[in-house]
Amino acid sequence: MSSIAKELANPDIKVPAEIEGNLIVTSIDKIYNWSRRNSLWPMLFGLACCAIEMICTAAARFDLSRFGMEVMRPSARQADLMIVSGTVTKKMVPQIVRLYNQMPEPKYVMAMGACASGGGPFKDGYNVVSGIDKFLPVDVYVPGCPPTPQALLHGLITLQKKIDSQSIRTVRWYQPGAEEPIPVPILGPDLIDPRHAGLLRQRAAEQAALVEQAALVAAPAVEPAATEPPAAG
Amino acid sequence: MATAELSNLKLKAEDVKLHEAFPDAVSVETRKGYSGYTVKPKHLVEVATALRDRYNFKFLSAATPVHYLEQGQMEMVYHLYNLDAGGGAIVLHAQTSHDAPVLPSLTPIFPGADFQEREAWDLYGIKFTGHPNLRRILMWEGFHGHPMRKDWKEAYFEQDSKPYDTRWPGGQVHRVEDKNPFGNNVAYPDGFTLEGWSEESDRTMYDAMPVDGKGLTTEGMQTDYVTVNLGPQHPSTHGVLRLIVTLDGETIVKLDPVMGYLHRNHEKIGERNTFIQNIPFTDRLDYLTPMCNNHGYVMAVEKLMGAKVPERAEYLRVIMDEFTRVASHLWWIGFFLNDLGAFFTPALYMMTEREMILDVFEATAGSRMMVNYMRFGGVSRDLPPGALETLKELAFERLPRKIDEIEAYLTDNEIVRSRCIGVAALSAADAIGYSVSGPILRAAGVPYDIRKAEPYGIYDRFDFNIALGQTGDLFDRYKVRVFEARESVKILQQALTQLPEGEILSGKQQYQARVPAGEAYGRIESPKGELGFYTVSNGKPNPYRYHVRAPSFINLTSLGKACEGWKVADVVAILGSIDIVLGEVDR
């Protein structure tokens, strides 16, 4: 029996000796996860320094294809793993969210490196989003600046373990009510998350109220000032 | 372009007496620690034209804005070089009020100032009269304010300079997200709501493109122009660059690079950091050449400090720089072949060699890519045991053999030759005009290499040649880089043989650098071109101004011109030949 068959076969069910090796009895979860975990197609998409290490991971020395993840696709439609490899800037994040929305389910997101995980060394920059998890659901975070190829491989193997643990009955993409696309951020005077529209309105109202209040407080102070010149005259 | 007077061809910066030639317009800079001249803004164009035409200072290397908040002034600093004479720069300062800063544009006479002036408008709000296309370049249209001004505060602002007092009071981590009502790094103008507001960011960009379909008429058929986008997510843009291209059939009518998708505010963060905290940040500029970035920055600060570098440290710097150059050029060759269509196989060979070099970097500095290796007055760590033997084996045996192998496979390859020879030739005059530097400038036939023209460190001790192309086409750029890799190996062989024993850092290791007030511009020949760091210190622990003259960014100025009239498929190759790294383009 091959090692794959051994991995998949259900040890509780005995297969008659004469057809052993030709027949595997397994659960649908097991075979579904097994096929997905061994053919992860990452999107060919790099943002910053981490992308260089991602390329090195795909190259001869570290060889991503040992784990069945080497088929990098430049089109979001053909990918099922988005490796956010680098600093996410405000100017770029609308495109990243759009690409994520274009990926078909099942899809996973990996935040590679400090910047994608939480802003990293550039966190306080005015054009930097402090972590892609502000917008996308992240499955695996890979620490490092940049993570070494080994760390990225570890992250991908961790993702495989996560896939192994999923059940077809509970996964997001088979739940009733299909997943809504994530609203694409807008480039306004600063980056606008459409989900914050209510909060923005509320703050504007609060500020307007404050201005009104200040005007009310200031109004009595203006009156004596206005009456002063006639008094002097 | 008028030719300079013959006697002025080899004029050095210190021999030009600008204040005597223009007594009304120019005065010698008198601020302590500053050099060069102050020019009255209304005479700026006149003085710059004279420098270009009469004194042969044709190369406008850097145009840097500085905001002096206390003086209420906005200043532009220009560095001009005479490429025939070599040596230092003529530095011009032009000042204007910071309330509504206006200066004359130098773009009409130095096209290389184009992107740099747009950056100054974007980040500082300086209006340049006479600039043909003054739009934002790194941020988007509609962004509120000009973020590099000293009076502009980012959403996560805590204090003007690090280390921040609020970090870990009593061991408690404070997350800036928790203090921001939106949980992210955003701040809006007062009273802003989504109602009554409309997005405008891309309209101005498309407006600048030609729309009139009066293009090629073939056999009586009139064609229409089509404007398309390449990027920002595209596998051949080397990162997150976007090109807006107007096409007539398959021919490029106009091409406009759009950048800023990786603008991570290097300079703003750099001005909050202390001097020494900036060293690891420079690694992340051009992340393929971190050693060179370190070197350029520490050199600029060492100029201000007057620090001496021990002999062994100088050698180690050269060794690291040149290995970086070989690694960077090999990487470029691999990915240039990618751009030509030989997908990934050549790149795999190049990366194998690069890994060898990275291993030594990791053993020495502790990290493969982000080395954080150099310090003011030396380097941080000595070579570990056994590293010297590995380096010698690389420099004497492996790399020369591999470069021969590359040449054997690629240089006479039919496809490489037919895709490259004669494509997008950039003339020497154009290259200088666009302030292009590095291998592209040399491919255009200008023998200018900072290691020879204004030797820094100990580069004057080594015997090496400058690569030189003839036509400036893609093939010349390829040949120049192969040749340079060979010359780097030659320098490495000399440096590794001569490497003396001794200390690697002058003085003792310090957490804080004492930097006297003044300005300094340190530049090195990075594998991409002239990498310069302009720093202004006011005597405090953090730099008052920290600017990077990024070669990839300025070399991109020539892309639009180089692509005109070529086909869509060539654009990818032409872009690849410039060798951009987006971390440096956008900073």
Image (cartoon, helix red, strand yellow):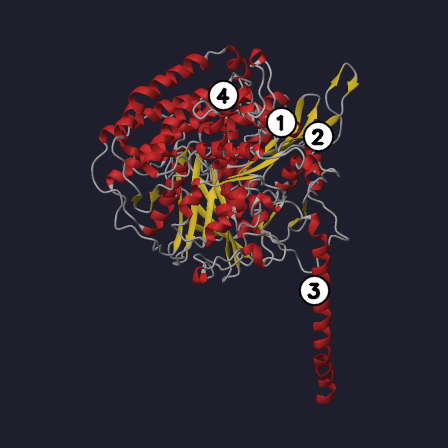
Report which residue position mark 1 lands on: A27
B267 vs B348: above or below? below
Mark 2, secondary structure of its residue: strand
Res B88 seen here? no
- Amino acid type of the residue that numbered disc 3 sits on in the rendered structure: Gln
Q: Which chain does the residue under circle 2 lie in?
A: B
Mark 4, secondary structure of its residue: loop
Left or right relative to B584: residue B12? left
Q: Nearer the viewer, residue B439 or B353?
A: B353
Q: Nearer the viewer, residue B11 or B490?
A: B490
Report which residue position mark 3 lands on: A207
Q: Are marks 1 and 4 in contact (CB under 8 Å)?
A: no
Residue B516 in percent (x, y) is at: 35, 56
Q: Can you say which quadrant of the picture contains the C terminus of chain A? A: bottom right
- Amino acid type of the residue that numbered disc 4 sits on in the rendered structure: Thr
Residue A61 in percent (x, y) is at: 43, 24
- Judged by depth in the image, the label closer to the viewer, 2 or 3, is 3
Report which residue position mark 2 lands on: B227
- Judged by depth in the image, the label closer to the viewer, 2 or 1, is 1
Residue B397 found in image quarter: top left
Q: Which chain does the residue under circle 1 lie in?
A: A
Mark 1, secondary structure of its residue: loop
Question: Callout 1 environment at 10 Å: few (<14), some (14 to 19), or many (20+)?
Answer: few
Question: Callout 4 environment at 10 Å: few (<14), some (14 to 19), or many (20+)?
Answer: many
- Judged by depth in the image, the label closer to the viewer, 4 or 3, is 3
Residue B227 in percent (x, y) is at: 71, 30
Residue B120 in percent (x, y) is at: 56, 47
Q: How many labels does the image show?
A: 4
How far apart marks 4 and 3 lie (CA) works out to 63 Å
The disc at residue B471 is 4
- Amino acid type of the residue that numbered disc 1 sits on in the rendered structure: Ser
